[in-house]
Image (cartoon, helix red, strand yellow):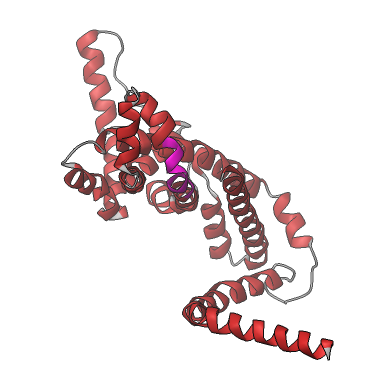
Amino acid sequence: MAGQKKNRQKRGGIMMAVRHNGPFVMFLLPSLAGVMVFILLPFLDVMKRSLHTAVTGEFMGVKNYDVIFHNQAFLLAVQNTIRFTLVCIPLLVLVGLMVALPLSSLKEAGLIKSVYLFPLAMPTATIVLVWKMVFYRQGFLNLLLTKLGEYTGWWGPVMTDYLGTGASFWVLVASYLWKNTGYTVVLWLAGILAIPNELLEAARVDGAGRWKSIRYIILPNLKGSFYTIVILSFLNSFKIYREAYLVAGSYPQEDIYLLQHLFNNWFVNMEFDKMAAAAVCVGIVLFGAIMLLQRLWDKTD
């Protein structure tokens, strides 16, 4: 009897949980189905292809992985992609915050936000054309530096090919910051404006100045915005390929040879087995990085 009573209580609890969570599950099912069909199943197929040859379908085990980790182009692309991510994300987060803090106190912040979002509306081809006009050998930057050198007498004509030297990396960084600073500023502003005015007013009454209010009130309340911005910036750093490809083609200067260049070249050469193995590695690393950020975020709460 006692066992039957426990079973009835257990079934009753399950039924109550189903009735309580049923609507949420129904809302989530379409999204979960989409993730399963368009992300998880294709990724599993890629994992399967990474263990076989591209042409004959012969099982190769982990040989494809061994090949890519001894491929100099893959190692160079990984190195440049990591370097680009580690440089751009802190710069973007910091620049966005430094712009958002003074904007948050302006009444015209809405109009200024629209100006900052303008780069997102610009076609990529147009942006690339502007960068070429500025940074190529006879571009506007070299003309400006040449005129300045003539005026001061400090140097002669400047004919630096910025897109063909190590400076191309910093050109790509500048392009990334120019295009993505706008949405970062908007996200920071949303977080700042969501802070209750009562907290800031109480801090001012207690004698806190602008910098102390930022340090002890504003920044601690921006943890949610910080996490969102870092994740989006991390993912967007992998979308800079369009600019790099349109500026320098499939085989750019080695400092801006990214993973996307490598994938494109392998795709053109129909080396799908190596591309699948590399895609699996990149997917695992991205997932691990996001989980690590989530864990660090949970520890700070």
- Rendered position, 279 above or below 164: below
Magenta residues (range):
219-227
Name the residue located 42 percent from the left edge and 46 percent from the top edge: 248
Secondary structure mainly formed by the magenta segment = helix
Name the residue located 72 percent from the left edge and 89 percent from the top edge: 8
- Rendered position, 271 above or below 27: above
Q: Nearer the viewer, residue 150 or 125?
A: 125
Instruction: Please indicate, yes or no, whether residue 294 appears anywhere in the rendered image.
Output: yes
Residue 291 in the image: state x and y as whole percent.
62, 54
Residue 83 in the image: state x and y as whole percent.
55, 38
Q: Is 201 placed left or right of 19 in the picture? A: left
Residue 45 in the image: state x and y as whole percent.
65, 75
- Would you identify the image quadrant in which residue 9 lies? bottom right
Residue 301 on the magenta span = no
Name the residue located 23 percent from the left edge and 49 percent from the top edge: 118
Residue 90 in the image: state x and y as whole percent.
47, 36
Instruction: Please indicate, yes or no, whether residue 254 appears anywhere in the rendered image.
Output: no
Name the residue located 79 percent from the left edge and 62 percent from the top edge: 62
- Would you identify the image quadrant in which residue 131 lies? top left
Quadrant location, the N terminus: bottom right
- Rendered position, 156 above or below 229: above
Q: Which of 282 and 249 is in front in this view?
A: 282
- Rendered position, 22 above or below 96: below
Q: How many numbered discs?
A: 0
